[in-house]
Image (spheres, rainbow, N blue to C red):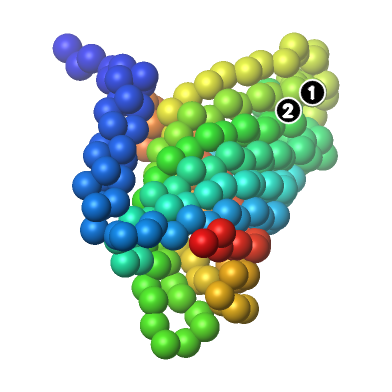
């Protein structure tokens, strides 16, 4: 019989792995570079299919920090907020659906590798895991185009992950702007077909502190 993985154990193991990477890499850098970045952006719900059609595109806000520990490799932390609102007209087209406004509040850790070159544009890739708190409000149940009933707010917290690529455009030694498409997976314990997924396009500012 298959046993579902303990989410807290998986998260603790992942955090420990990143701490070990940080500890082993810090010795290779005499003075690790610390940067802070904030962003705004647009979010697009991707899966499950019914929700992706019944929700409007959303907004993304985030604030994070990175410590460059070895050449282009950085350990990152980030807090983010994504929100999607209900498209009631589309929801009424379904034979049977229950949907509402949906938001995600997240805290994540990860690794980012930036390819440095002689130009001012530096591409990068990033991966990470975190805790995602999903909140569904204004929940409504529709049947054959009619509103049947409204449901109370629902909040769930799951382990999630992200994959991203982007490019950093340096303005000077302190300031840079970046553009980053990111794909987010909510609830890693679900099978691939049932995992909630959304896509974000982010534009932000990166400030080097030292």
In this rendering, the answer to whether 127 lies above or below 161 is below
Horizontally, residue 199 falls left or right of residue 205, namely left
* Identity of the residue drawn at 56% across and 34% down: 106
Point 63% across, 18% down: residue: 155
Whether residues under marks 1 and 2 lie with C-beta atoms below 8 angstroms apart, the answer is yes
Q: Which residue is denoted by mark 1 in the rendering?
A: 138
Q: Earlier in the sequence, mark 1 or mark 2?
A: 2
From mark 1 to mark 2, how far is it between C-alphas?
5 Å
Q: How far from the left and from the top, in percent, is residue 169?
A: 56, 76
Closer to the camera, 144 or 8?
8
State the SS at label 1: strand
Residue at coordinates 59% horizontally, 70% vertically from top-left? 174
Please tell me how crowded label 2 is: few (under 14), some (14-19), or many (20+) other residues with Cα within 10 Å: many
State left or right for residue 45 relative to residue 151: left
Residue sticking out furthest to the bottom: 118
Query: Circle 2 sits on which residue?
Result: 100
The quadrant in which residue 112 appears is bottom left
């Amino acid at each position: 019989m298959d046993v579902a993985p303990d989410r807290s154990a998986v998260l603790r193991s992942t955090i420990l792995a990143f701490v070990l990477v940080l500890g082993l890499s810090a010795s290779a850098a005499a003075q690790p570079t610390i940067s802070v970045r904030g962003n705004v952006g647009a979010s697009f719900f991707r899966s499950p299919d019914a929700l992706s059609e019944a929700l409007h595109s959303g907004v993304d806000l985030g604030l994070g920090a990175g410590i460059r520990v070895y050449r282009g490799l950085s350990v990152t932390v980030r807090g983010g907020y994504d929100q999607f609102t209900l498209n009631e007209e589309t929801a009424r087209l379904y034979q049977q659906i229950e949907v509402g406004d949906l938001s995600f509040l997240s805290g994540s850790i990860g690794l980012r590798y930036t390819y440095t070159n002689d130009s001012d544009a530096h591409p990068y890739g990033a991966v990470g895991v975190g805790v995602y708190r999903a909140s569904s409000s204004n929940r409504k149940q529709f049947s054959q185009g009619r509103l049947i009933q409204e449901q109370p707010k629902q909040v769930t917290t799951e382990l999630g992950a992200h994959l991203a690529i982007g490019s950093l455009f340096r303005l000077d030694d302190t300031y840079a702007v970046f553009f980053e498409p990111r794909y987010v997976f909510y609830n890693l314990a679900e099978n691939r077909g049932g995992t909630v997924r959304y896509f974000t396009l982010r534009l932000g500012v990166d400030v080097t502190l030292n």
